[in-house]
Amino acid sequence: MTVPFSRFLGYDHGEDGNLVINQEQAKIVKQIYGLFLKGKAPRMIAKMLTEQGIPTLGGKEKWSDRTVRGILTNEKYKGGALLQKSFTVDFLTKAKKDNEGEIPKYYVKGNHEAIIEPEVVDLVQNKMALRTKGKNGLSSVSIFSSKIKCGDCGSWYGSKTWHSNSKYKRTIWQCNHKYHDGNKCATPHFIEEDIQEKFITAANQIIENKDEIIENFNIIKDTIFSTEKLESEKLELETEVNQVAGLIEECISENARVALDQTDYENRYTAFVERYDRATKRLEKVQEEIQLK
């Protein structure tokens, strides 16, 4: 299936109009995904690419975190395409508008060769979705960022510098919302050296007992983390959503071309949309359950 695309990093347009991998650009895309999975924030990745002298797709010397975010959230890198982002509102003038929910969007798998494995793209997009502002937003400022939680309010601990201009300078960690809204969390602060020691101790305990840990994990993983049934249902629902989306599109197109009885048209259209909404809601629920597992 050939799908119309705008130009973006990692792909060129082939002779058939579909996407073909640009190998040199694909290396940059893989580097961006790799850096993000190593804990680098989009802003830091943009800074690193700029310092390396790698030009953007538009030939600019400076990368922005917005550009990096766009690459990290683009479903096309896993070989698929989201269709009907816009639609034709007038078949005579061919006028188009952005799809703001008037008709369903649907996803086509395997439309072109992937640069990033689909599972990796899904993992990255899940992590990107968690990078929200607020007390539970993820951070990548430090190796310990988003790894220590306050026992009172549930916020992440963050680093603070004490006595920055004196010989007593030290880095401490405390709840990021310790003094917010007039409520002081009772959790203590920690010196970074103490945190390092605790993490090393924990890592050594895991290494020492790794065989037992792995054995226990293998016993419970199939029961707790198995997504086989959910994945099967997800596939069926995706097929249903795409099929019904196609029926809705055909229904709209027919009504635009032929003078149909509008009562009959509205009934058919409504039935298709209700069927689509049921499948979509269940699909979202199944995807949430898979992510949770």
Image (tube, rainbow, N blue to C red):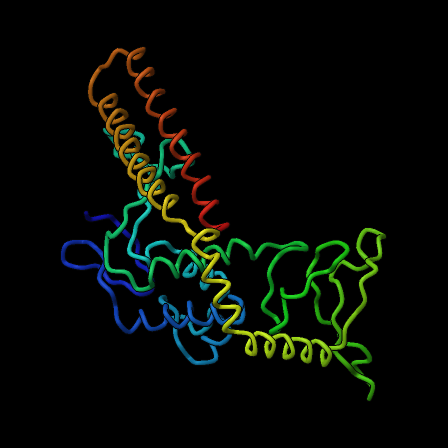
Between residue 215 and residue 27, name the one nearer to us: 215
Q: Residue at x 44, y 34 (%)?
A: 281
Q: Residue at x 24, y 60 (%)?
A: 113
Between residue 200 and residue 278, name the one nearer to us: 200
Q: Is 210 located above or below residue 98 in the figure?
A: below
Image quadrant where residue 241 sits: top left
Q: Position of residue 125 (x, y in %)?
A: 45, 56
Q: Position of residue 100 (x, y in %)?
A: 42, 36
Q: Position of residue 117 (x, y in %)?
A: 33, 62
Q: How many marks overall? A: 0
The residue lying furthest to the left in this view is 15
Image quadrant where residue 168 sits: bottom right
Q: Is 114 located above or below residue 206 in the figure?
A: above
Q: Residue at x 42, y 67 (%)?
A: 33
Image quadrant where residue 72 sits: bottom left
Q: Is 238 located above or below residue 186 in the figure?
A: above
The residue lying furthest to the bottom in this view is 167
Residue 2 falls left or right of residue 73: left
Q: Position of residue 101 (x, y in %)?
A: 42, 34
Between residue 106 and residue 60, name the one nearer to us: 106
Q: Residue at x 82, y 80 (%)?
A: 163
